[in-house]
Amino acid sequence: MNDEDDDAPLLSIGAFARCVGLAPSALRFYDDCDVLRPARVDEATGYRYYARAQRPRAVALRRLRAAGLPLAEAAAVLDGEPEEARRVLHGHLLRTRDLAEATRAAVEEILRTLPGGGGRAAAVVGGPELAGALRQVAPAVARGAAREEFPVLGNVLIELDGQEVRLVATDRYRLAVRVLPGRSMAGGPGRALVDADLLADVGGWALRGTDVRIEVEGGRAVLRADDGPERALPGADGAFPSYRVMLDALAPVRTRVITDRGALRAALDGRHGEGEGGSVVRVRAEERELALSRGDSPPTALRAVCTGPPQDLVFDPAVLLPALEASVGPDVLLEIASAAEPVVVRSADQGSFTMLVMPVHDGV
């Protein structure tokens, strides 16, 4: 408190409330909770008076409460150490993201069950870009026993939202997300679950046109090429996993690795001679190299640019290889949180494609 504040007259509860954007009733409540005590309380009348130096705390409290923080957590932010404040705020941010995603998914599901099947959304994307996006997410579609156990994972999610078109697929071990910039967006948001088998030849069809118009309504999608032909894609049943929650829940990246995509593919493929579910490959990321080994075989060293602490991971090549094959460009970027967390695989020069790949537990 500076000298000017020391000499300034105290403000009544009404005047202080107007000054900081809080209601007098809120100030009484915060006083009762011992979070924002007045500078003085008149013993005869019980009137509360506040000092001007209390304005920053009151404004901060108002903002924290507007952000939805419980009072106990708001007090921890105001009075705790900076590290504690950051921990509390980060935890609240994750909870609000999860709640927002759950709310969005629930509302969209209700909208789809209403007569008419929900609103209509449309977007125009480049035909070659759509073909490339379908190729990139296809490896993450569930096949075989996984698809029999979880039929919904045999679909690709087509989502139109804002100015973006997203294609999403997951088989529980991989999650692929490709974002396409939409042109001439209309309506929305909208989404459709489409059987991956129905999309198998759409890529070749989309390549024949410069542009493709995607229309989503009632859980189904219609693709129209600029030269006239169209593809009607009926919607599939089931609740697709909340992929945004999965992305938001990712642990902070500790190590980033950029290496030659072709060299990494070749090194993995050379150790992948036992078909689906072949033996695991151990990967160690260090400052200037990526070392791959299996069993007692000598490691293969690849040049790499690594930032962050060294990491040791174990992969099933059958899971990691398709992620590399779906990427584009000469380099691949691996973002690693730990040996037990999903690894984010990106094209080093294309941030619109993301695939999460689960490592296997050490000792497998």
Image (cartoon, rainbow, N blue to C red):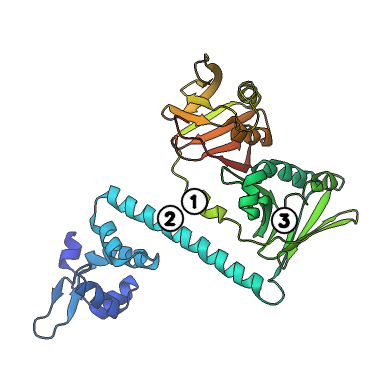
Give whichever of discs 3 and 2 has the lower sequence position. Answer: 2
Residue 239: mark in rendering:
none
- Say what secondary structure mark 3 lies in: strand
Q: Give the image quarter of residue 66.
A: bottom left
Left or right, 115 with respect to 225, comes to left
Q: Categorize mark 1 by other alpha carbons within 10 Å: few (<14), some (14-19), many (20+).
A: few
Residue 194: mark in rendering:
3
Name the quadrant of the N terminus. Answer: bottom left
Q: Which residue type carries mark 1?
A: Asp
Q: Which residue type carries mark 2?
A: Leu
Residue 94: mark in rendering:
2
- Say what secondary structure mark 2 lies in: helix
Q: Marks 1 and 2, how far apart in space?
A: 7 Å
Classify 357 as above or below 265.
below
Indicate the position of residue 134 as horizontal and vertical percent values: 73, 45
Indicate the position of residue 181 as horizontal and vertical percent values: 69, 51
Q: Marks 1 and 3, how far apart in space?
A: 24 Å
The residue to which callout 1 is attached is 248
Q: Marks 3 and 2, how far apart in space?
A: 30 Å
Badge nearest the viewer, 1 or 3: 3
- Residue extending farthest to the bottom is 45
Determine contact: label 1, label 2, CB under 8 Å: yes
Q: Nearer the viewer, residue 25 or 89?
A: 89
Q: Which residue type carries mark 3?
A: Val
- Residue extending farthest to the top is 298
Give whichever of discs 1 and 2 has the lower sequence position. Answer: 2
